[in-house]
Image (spheres, grey):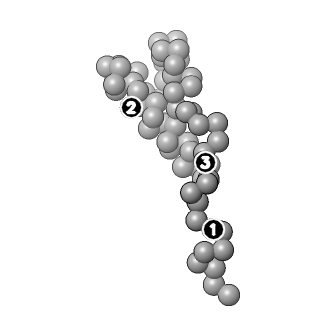
Amino acid sequence: MGVEAQHVAILTAVSALLTAGAPQLITLPSPAAQLPAAAGSIGFPNAFYPTNQARPNTEGVVK
């Protein structure tokens, strides 16, 4: 799940830059001095991803 959280963070940040009309800032490495202040937090809207709708961990277990 950690890798998927990274994917969500990157895609959210890229989406925000595209929406802001700044596609030139989507590069590796990123020009940190040119990024808007929100760039440091926009990719992580959830401190913890909710798991209240997760399937039970015993589902699909083969015995």
Q: Which mark is first along the chain, 2 or 3?
A: 2
Q: Is residue 24 left or right of residue 7?
A: left
Residue, disc 2 = 15
Q: Residue drawn at (63%, 68%), measured in percent from left and top?
A: 56
Q: Residue drawn at (60%, 45%), measured in percent from left and top?
A: 49
The type of residue carrying mark 2 is Ser
Q: Which mark is first along the chain, 1 or 2?
A: 2
Residue, disc 1 = 56
Q: Is residue 49 left or right of residue 26?
A: right
Q: Which mark is first along the chain, 3 or 1?
A: 3
Disc 1 is placed on an element classified as loop
Residue 10: image location, x then y, percent? 48, 36
Q: Is residue 51 left or right of residue 16?
A: right
Residue, disc 3 = 50
Disc 3 is placed on an element classified as loop
Residue 24 visible: no
